[in-house]
Image: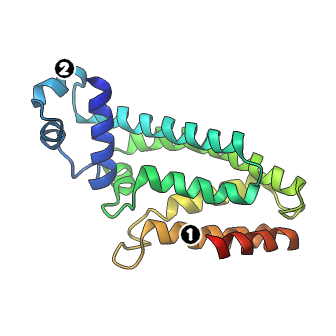
Amino acid sequence: MKEKIIQKAQYLFVAFGFKTVTMDDIANELAISKKTIYNFFENKTELVDATVNNLHKQLVAGISNIRENSVDPIKEFFEVKDLVMEHLHDQKNHSVFQLEKFYPEIYAKVKNKHLDFMIKSFGEVLTNGIEFGLFRKNIDVDFISRVYFNSISGLMNPEIYPSKIYTLDSCLESYREYFLRSIVTEKGLKKLDLILKND
C-alpha cells in the first residue's frame, strides 16, 4: 500500500502541483481513507519527500538505461528529453516551481543529488560526442554540463516561461536544438539535421 500511495501521490503532485494537491485528493483517488495514508506518512511534507526521491530514482534509472544502450551521443539528448516529459508531463501547473517555493528544503536536497548525477552523466555524453567527432574538441565539458542542467531547470520557471505562451515540451525541444547547434562539429551538424528532419 505504501508504494501505491507514493506512485499515486507522485502522479498527482507532478500533474497538478505539490501545493495544489491535498491529502484528501490522494485518498479519494486511491479510494482509501486519509487515515490510511497517515499510517505510512506522518504528514504531507513526508509524503512529498518520498515522492520526490522516488521521481529522482526513476529519472536516474531511466537516464542510466539510455546511457548504457546508446550508440549515438546526439540521439541521447532526444531520448532524455522524451524521458523527462514522460515523468514530468507538461508542467502546466508548475509542479517543480511549486516544490521549490513551498518545500524549499526538499527541493534543494533532491536538486543537489540530481545535479551531481546529471553533471556526471552529461559529461560522459559530451566526452563520447567529442571522441566520435560530433562535438567540438575545445568545449569545457564540466562547464557545458552545468550550463545545460541550469538551463533545463530554468525552463520550468513560470515567471520566465509563462504557460500561456510556452509549454515545457516546446521549451525543451527549442533549447535542445539551440544547445546542440552551439557545440556540434560539421559532422555532428549533419547528424543533428537528419535527426530533426525525421523527428
Indicate which disc, 1 or 2, sits on the residue closer to the N terminus: 2
Colouring scheme, one of rainbow, by chain, secondary structure, one colour: rainbow
Can residue 157 be spotted in the picture?
yes
Rendered-image quadrant of the N terminus? top left
Labels 1 and 2 touching (C-beta < 8 A): no
Label ID, residue 36: none
- Residue 191 sits above or below residue 91 on the image: below
| Mark 2 nearby-residue class (10 Å; few <14, some 14–19, many ≥20) | few
Callout 2 secondary element: helix
| Side of 51 where 32 appears, left or right | left
* Distance between mark 1 and mark 2 Cα atoms: 42 Å
Image side of residue 37 versus residue 88, left or right:
left
User: On the picture, is 173 further left or further right than 19?
Assistant: right
The kind of residue on which mark 2 rests is Asn
Asked if one can make out residue 120 in the rendered structure from this viewpoint, the answer is no
In this rendering, the answer to whether 58 lies above or below 167 is: above
* 129 to the left or right of 180: right
Q: Nearer the viewer, residue 64 or 166?
A: 64
Q: Which residue is mark 2?
A: 39
Amino acid at dot 1? Glu
Query: Few, some or many C-alpha atoms within 10 Å of disc 1 (few <14, some 14-19, many ≥20)?
Result: some
In the rendering, at what x and y percent does residue 34 appear? 12, 31
Taking the spot 58% from the left edge, 63% from the top edge, the residue there is 151
Q: Nearer the viewer, residue 23 or 1?
A: 1
Q: Where does the image place residue 135, in percent across and percent down from the top left?
A: 83, 63
The residue that appears at 39% across and 70% down in the rendered structure is 159
Q: Quadrant of residue 54?
A: top left
